Image (cartoon, rainbow, N blue to C red):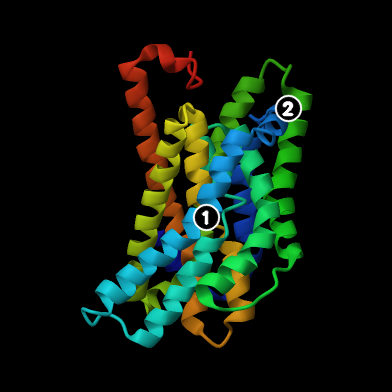
Amino acid sequence: MILGLGLSFKGSNLIGTVSTFGIPIGLFFMIYPAMTKVHLKEILGGMKDVRKLGLMIFLNYAIAPFLVGGLAYLFFFGIFERFGLIGTQVGSQVLVGIILLGVAPCIAMVMVWTDLAKGNLAAGVSFVAWNSIIQVMTTPFLVYLLARTQLIINPLVILKSVILYLATPLVAGALTRYFLWRKPYFTKFLNGLGTVQTLALMFTIVSIFWSEGSGIMDHITLVWMVGVVMLTFYFVLFHLGYYAAKRAKFDYPDSTAIGFTVSARDFEISIAIAIVAFSAYPYVIFTTAIGPLLEIPLMLLLVWLQLTKRNSIMKTNPSKGVILGEK
């Protein structure tokens, strides 16, 4: 993060290139290693699991947008404005930006968080596939309901993300398994990909902060205000999804996959909507632009919390190791 901020000033002439090529490349090499662990049959099975899908859809589309809107209103108009930290005009624009971040579930990096936390990656991929279809229909309705703005979602925007961050890594992972899984060095190769994933994660963080660093420093107060709202949102919604899944008798991997799927957001579609529908309101666009800057460290915090929880389950009841994927 610090390196990215420094490069945003020292290498400002490369910001466009980094945003266009650096971030997609980093995301691909974050997601591809995870996809080498997934079996296509498991994904197809997950897409037919009505109980898991029903819970995920309910939390993603009936709870998440209203929760993030309510939290934004509470903090910005109930706390920040009351204490004179922000004006009504700017606060209203930021409110809309946060709503845009909340209406569309993530269809890319959520698979990385699920994989890092040892969740059910096959279920996570199936959730992403369904969300890429559902949000085309629900996002215009939710934006109109919460932000009172009519818009039409261009399916090509979502299709581009699906091809780049779901289909391409999935095909690459499937081909890797097909050609190498019988080889004696396949396990070592997968371990090497784990290192690649970690390096790609760090590269992506640098790239994102490089491309948006100047905006952060110009509006540092606004960044921490939005950060408070989004941290609360991610934390509350993740645990709502996780414990609702546990209450429904799902195991740790399934519950973790649901938790990350309902909390991670699709910042690409949020930014696209802000640019098209709210071009006259700069703070709306800025708020959606800093979404990924905030999401990565906050989701990594949730990954760490989940791994801690998983280790606690293993110590308390070692017999659950098989369920958690350990032998």
Residue at far left of view: 83
Q: Residues within 10 Å of mark 2 (few under 14, many from 20)?
A: few
Say if residue 199 shows up in the picture.
Answer: no
User: Could you tell me how far apart the alpha carbons at marks 2 and 1 are, in whole angstroms?
Assistant: 29 Å
The residue sitting at 38% across, 80% down in the picture is: 91
For badge 2, the amino acid type reads Lys
Snapshot quadrant of residue 21: bottom right
* Residue 327: x %, y % from top left: 48, 13
Q: Nearer the viewer, residue 292 or 244?
A: 244
Is 221 above or below relative to 89? Answer: above
**Total marks in image:** 2
* Residue 31: x %, y % from top left: 62, 43
Q: According to the image, label 2 marks what residue?
A: 41
Mark 2 touches mark 1? (CB < 8 Å): no
Is 145 above or below relative to 206? Answer: below
The residue sitting at 44% across, 16% down in the picture is: 321
For badge 1, the amino acid type reads Ala
Q: Residues within 10 Å of mark 1 (few under 14, many from 20)?
A: few
Mark before the other along the chain sequence, 2 or 1? 2
Say if residue 112 shows up in the picture.
Answer: yes
Quarter of the figure with the N terminus: bottom left
Q: Which mark is residue 62?
A: 1
> What secondary structure is found at the residue carrying circle 2?
helix
